[in-house]
Amino acid sequence: MFGKLGLGLGLGAHRIVDRYGNMPATFTVTSGDGTKYVRVQVSETTTVTPAGGTSIRIGSSGEFVTTPLTLAANTNQDIYFKDAGSFTIPKRKLVTYLYIFNLGSSVITGDITGMKLTYLFLRYLGSSVITGDITGMKLTYLLLNGIGSSIITGDITGMKLTTLYLNGIGSSLSYGTNLLNITSTLGIQLLGNTV
């Protein structure tokens, strides 16, 4: 019966994408020093637009700008950010890959509901908060580790996961309707010939 992260809301996967997929993917920056990034991949060429004082660049070199930048299709790209404000990708459903790691003192928030992720990596988020429902995503790689106050919900049944790593995920994990409080550094283990 293990197959739920958080609370299953009973919404069909297509309804989640229909309702949320056309909404913008906005990451709000409370604090950013320009040394941290969000790695994304999008399914078609699009833009990422900073607002409210945040400046961005694609990659680890070059100038930070406050104007839209182009994200190429099907390529991992690092969006470096600094100063308070936000940056936005026009539609959540364009985002197929999201990697956020070791943000340190940089703080961002965002919602992944409606993204068409095949790869989700959230690790050592510090004070940053990423939320959302992964039901219906075609994830093959799911890693949640040390996500602090972030809450990821949904049903992993039917996903063709080749990697599933859950450790230090706070309120994100439940079994049925019961919240699990996994405190062991070993997290959850599936041992032997587990099918």
Image (cartoon, rainbow, N blue to C red):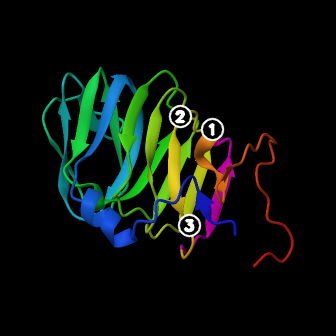
- Camera-side mark, 3 or 1: 3
Q: Residue at x 35, y 58 (%)?
A: 115
Circle 3: is it few (<14), some (14-19), or many (20+) Cα within 10 Å?
many
Quarter residue 51 falls in: top left
Query: Callout 2: few (<14), some (14-19), or many (20+) C-alpha neighbours within 10 Å?
Result: many
**Quarter of the rendering occupied by the N terminus:** bottom right
Disc 2 marks which amino acid? Leu
66 over 150 or under it: above or below: above
In the image: residue 56, left or right of residue 126:
left
Q: Earlier in the sequence, mark 1 or mark 2?
A: 2
Query: Is label 3 in a helix, a strand or a loop?
Result: loop
Which residue type carries mark 3? Ile
Q: Secondary structure at mark 2?
A: loop
Q: Secondary structure at mark 1?
A: loop
| Circle 1 Cα neighbour tier, 10 Å, few/some/many (<14 / 14–19 / ≥20) | some
Q: Which residue is mark 3?
A: 156
Q: In the image, is residue 162 part of the stretch drawn in magenta?
A: yes
Observer-nearest residue: 67 or 140?
140
Residue most toward the front?
177
Q: Residue at x 82, y 42 (%)?
A: 184
Is 37 inside the magenta-drawn segment?
A: no
Q: Which residue is mark 2?
A: 125
User: CB under 8 Å between callouts 3 and 1?
Assistant: no
Residue 120 % position (x, y): 49, 55
Residue 103 percent coordinates (x, y): 49, 31
Q: CA distance from mark 3 to mark 2?
A: 22 Å
Q: Earlier in the sequence, mark 3 or mark 1?
A: 1
Q: Which residues are magenta?
A: 159-170
Q: Quadrant of residue 27?
A: top left
- Dot 1 and dot 2 residues touching (CB under 8 Å): yes
Spatial CA span between label 1 and label 2: 7 Å
| Residue pointed to by mark 1 | 146
